[in-house]
Amino acid sequence: MKRKAWLILGLVLPVLGQPLSLLQRAQKVFAPLPQRMDEKGKIPGPALIELGRTLFYEKRLSQNNTMSCNSCHDLRYGFGADGRPTSPGAVSGRGTRNAPTVYHAALHSWQFWDGRSPTVESQAGSPLTNPVEMAMPDGFEVEKRLLADPGYRRLFAQAFPGDPQPVRYAYVMLAIGAFERGLVTPAPFDRYLEGDETALDSRQLKGLEHFLRVGCAECHHGAALGGTELRKLGRKEAFASQDRGRFLATHAAADDGVFKVPSLRNVCETGPYYHNGQVRQLEEAVALMGRHECGQQLTPQEVAELCDFLTSLTGEIPKDYVRSP
């Protein structure tokens, strides 16, 4: 059954003769955040997480020692984003796509705007050797730099005690991914989904009603309110973009203009918006999405109330967990 039909059945049909409450409708579409986002029940040990945290802030993972993962995904102040349409590289030039937040990325079915990596672990190594990002020549150079540091040799040995040569590029990706799986920011909306109907105010609740009625939840659903769909941008009305999206990764005609649906967690704090960062104001982004994706010409009041609902997705940064080593 198509998702839209499923939403109609799940959100509109009465249960035992009684219409579903707004909370019940929301609980059918969304889910509270987990405490961690571990893969298939695998819980990484503290040594692996500490190694990943240290590597996330390590500028020696860039060619000229100027950039770390945190340079574009600021965990302490930007909810994992850097506030720029596109980010500068370590050596020269800029990326062509907006750097998304890494908070809750482990809940996504795909990584990168074009979905070319399936997990945060497989994603973690790509920016290191990307010539426009951190510009390391290869994984061997990454290993060489880390091996030269006694502190890293100790951290890798603690994280991978069964390996006589634990400083490996593959382990760099595993460690960064393990750390990222703890990047969770519980928000008022989570308390609401758990049954606290006072967690959202009247305008936020009105915005949630719009969100379900207009069709936003058709793409933005689940615990992350996004990240699990690959969609063609501009389904109802064409959206001007020179970026061909997933097509550049797969070269399949069906993927032309297809992008990952972003998570809406902390969206009020992670602008600018869209894959190219071309929209700076959240209100404009909401209005454009209503027209281009849902086929709805939203009124200014509807836009404002939808934005009020989105404020309920702004969580609390786990300051101790993301501390700089």
Image: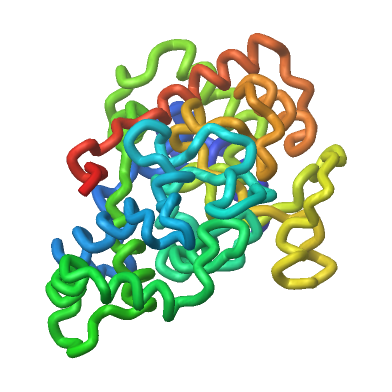
Q: Is residue 18 visible?
A: no
Rendering coords of residue 301 (x, y %): 64, 10
Residue 57 locus on image (x, y percent): 32, 51
Q: Residue at x 60, y 67 (%)?
A: 116
Q: Is 278 in front, or is 186? A: 278
User: Residue 200, located in which quarter of the rendered image?
Assistant: top left
**Residue toward you, 190 or 106:** 106
* Foreground pick, 273 / 205: 273
Q: Where is residue 213, by image quadrant?
A: top right
Q: Is residue 239 left or right of residue 188?
A: right
Q: x, y (%) of residue 117?
A: 54, 67
Task: Name, please, the residue furthest toward the bottom.
Answer: 164
Q: Residue at x 23, y 82 (%)?
A: 166
The residue positioned 64% from the left and 15% from the top of the image is: 302
Q: What colour scheme was applied to this rendering of the protein?
A: rainbow
> Does 306 sit left or right of 163 as displayed?
right
Q: Is residue 87 visible?
A: yes
Residue nearer the viewer, 10 or 126: 126
Please state if 32 lies on the left or on the right of 10 as rendered.
left
Count of numbered badges drawn on the protein = 0
Q: Is residue 92 above or below residue 116?
A: above
